[in-house]
């Protein structure tokens, strides 16, 4: 018998398989999430920062959400406040897309 992980033990068995979020759903989900949490940030003195995908292309078949300049513009426009911004690193920002 193999040992079970904490999450498996807590649920009394194996975790159910989850479907992957598509690349079309991911930006919508991120913006919905940000619109819920960003308004609370100034009240608590928190500033949020989004880090671009690193690398900016699909990895292990998972969708990416912040890979292009247009992705960044759309996300920032959806929550235009000083409490929400970007964390930039030359490696992620300067990578060539495939």
Image (cartoon, rainbow, N blue to C red):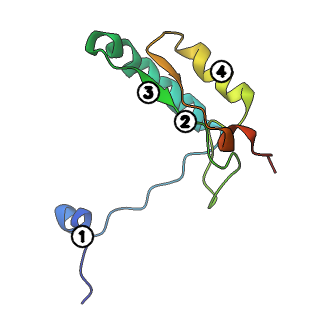
Q: Is residue 24 left or right of residue 9?
A: right
Query: How far, Cα to Cα, is label 2 from label 4?
Result: 14 Å
Identify which residue, 90 or 56, lies in the foreground.
90
Helix, strand, or loop for circle 4?
A: helix
What residue sits 44% from the left and 56% below the top? 18
Helix, strand, or loop for circle 2?
A: loop
Callout 4 environment at 10 Å: few (<14), some (14 to 19), or many (20+)?
A: few
Query: How far, Cα to Cα, is label 4 from label 1?
Result: 40 Å
Q: Along the polypeptide, which appears first: circle 2 or circle 1?
A: 1
Residue marked by disc 4:
74
What residue sits 81% from the left and 51% below the top? 98
Q: Along the polypeptide, which appears first: circle 2 or circle 4?
A: 2
Callout 3 environment at 10 Å: few (<14), some (14 to 19), or many (20+)?
A: few
Q: Along the polypeptide, which appears first: circle 4 or circle 3?
A: 3
Residue marked by disc 1:
13
In contact (CB < 8 Å): disc 2 and disc 3: no
Query: How far, Cα to Cα, is label 3 from label 1?
Result: 29 Å
């Amino acid at each position: 018998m193999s040992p079970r992980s904490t999450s498996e033990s807590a649920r009394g068995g194996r975790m159910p398989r989850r479907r992957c979020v598509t690349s079309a759903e991911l930006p919508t989900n991120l913006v919905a999430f940000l619109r819920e949490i960003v308004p609370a940030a100034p009240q608590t003195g928190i500033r949020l920062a989004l880090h671009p995908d690193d690398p900016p292309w699909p990895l292990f078949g998972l969708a990416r959400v912040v890979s292009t300049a247009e992705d960044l513009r759309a996300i920032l426009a959806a929550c235009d406040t000083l409490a929400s911004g970007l964390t930039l690193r030359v490696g992620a920002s300067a990578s060539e897309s495939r």
